[in-house]
Image (spheres, rainbow, N blue to C red):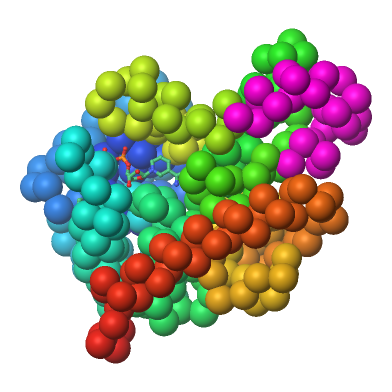
Amino acid sequence: MTLRKPFTAIIGAGQVGATTAQRILEKGISDVVLFDVVEGMPQGKALDLMEAAPLEGHDRRILGTNRYEDIRGAEIVVVTAGLPRKPGMSREDLLSLNAKIIRDVCQNVKNQAPESKLIIVTNPLDIMTYLAFRVTGFPSERVFGMAGVLDTARMRYFIAENLEVVPKEVEAVVLGGHGDLMVPVSSHSKVKGKLVSGLIGAPDLAKIEQRTRDGGAEIVALLKTGSAFYAPASSVAAMVEAILKDQKKILPVCAYLRGAYGLKELYFGVPAQLGARGVEKVIELALGEEENKALLRSADKVKQGIEEIERLVLTGTNP
Ligand code: TXD
């Protein structure tokens, strides 16, 4: 099958990877290569998705594969490969297992698609994005992570639910690392241009912020096995579209910081302009004192993770 450029490669054809492929195809954004190490699985999902094309009415193509050579020429590579945490497994165990996977994937991406933009999805997100940056040696504007689009979508939905308005009319801001310490910023969240702080009382707003922080865990608890994938897939597709259409859209992105927000040499969730070159600009928002403090707490946690990854995976290596 011949794919038309520019196309998107997705590494990891699990829940998030396959659903992202579906979104990208059915929205007509680009052709897709779906890669996984499990034999037959990406091919089966790709065939199933192609068989939906007559009904969905799109003319996009998807190739399922176990060969890295097939990602050659990809404009964007989305990495969803990884393992979920199993009972009894420590955070450090998961970190080093997923780090091994990300390292292997990124070495292959570096060899086969050296000009691509890389969107990391695998958890722990900020740390895996940093690792991808170190292993590929790509310029930081071409390596970034997806988390903020999802976290803000959750917050937007919770605000919309509270006010009984259409979710897409709500704007929200969530900054920081993709974890318990993320910082929902109500002071910059709006509905049709009006600040939510004037529309929702403080106690309800505090609940919405906490539900946003716990958004991933809430779904995990309901599903029992696996984690969220519909909204994560929509989030990745929005980022892919912004890049391929050079939309210059401002989206929350896990981006490399060089001084913005007083932080440097780490990957962290901030609003950024996404266009054909990748992360084209990091946007700095004016924050209140409490918001700033919360952001620094989140940054400290991400820095600890980066130190851990340097110690566990990168020390003594010359990627
Ligand atoms: O906001 C976010 N960033 C996230 C992150 C939102 C949702 C999910 N998030 C994380 O994405 C989640 O914690 C996981 O680390 C990844 C993927 O989640 P998903 O739910 O898609 O996991 P699956 O269904 O287990 O799929 C993972 C696939 C599976 O098919 C494996 O066979 C494959 O990854 N896998 C690999 N593919 C390629 N190469 C290697 N080495 C490999 N190892 C496993």
248 left or right of 126 in image: right
Left or right for 291, reference 77: right
Q: At 66% from the left edge and 31% from the top edge, which residue is drawn?
A: 209
Asked whether residue 187 is drawn in magenta, I would say yes
The x and y percentages for residue 110 are 33, 76
Q: Is residue 301 placed above or below 231 in the rendered structure? A: below
Say whether residue 49 is left or right of residue 143: left
Q: In this figure, what is the number of numbered marks?
A: 0
Q: Quadrant of the C terminus?
A: bottom left
Viewer can see residue 118: no
Q: Does residue 208 sit above or below 257 in this rendering?
A: above
Residue at the image position 60 percent from the left and 55 percent from the top: 297
Quadrant position of residue 256: bottom right
Q: Say if 138 sits above or below 219 in the image.
A: below
In this view, 108 is above or below 206: below
- The x and y percentages for residue 51 are 28, 28
Q: Quadrant of ligand 1?
A: top left
Relative depth, front residue between 128 and 287: 287
Q: Along the line of sight, which residue is nearer the eye, 292 or 244? A: 292
Residue 204 visible somewhere in the drawing: yes
Q: Which residues are magenta?
A: 185-210
Left or right relative to 281: residue 210: left
Whole-percent x and y of residue 113?
A: 35, 72
| Magenta run includes residue 87 | no
Q: Residue furthest top?
A: 164
> Residue at 49% of width from left, 67% of height from top?
303
Residue 28 coordinates in the image, percent (x, y) = 50, 40
Asked whether 228 or 276 is in front, the reply is 228
Q: Residue furthest left?
A: 39
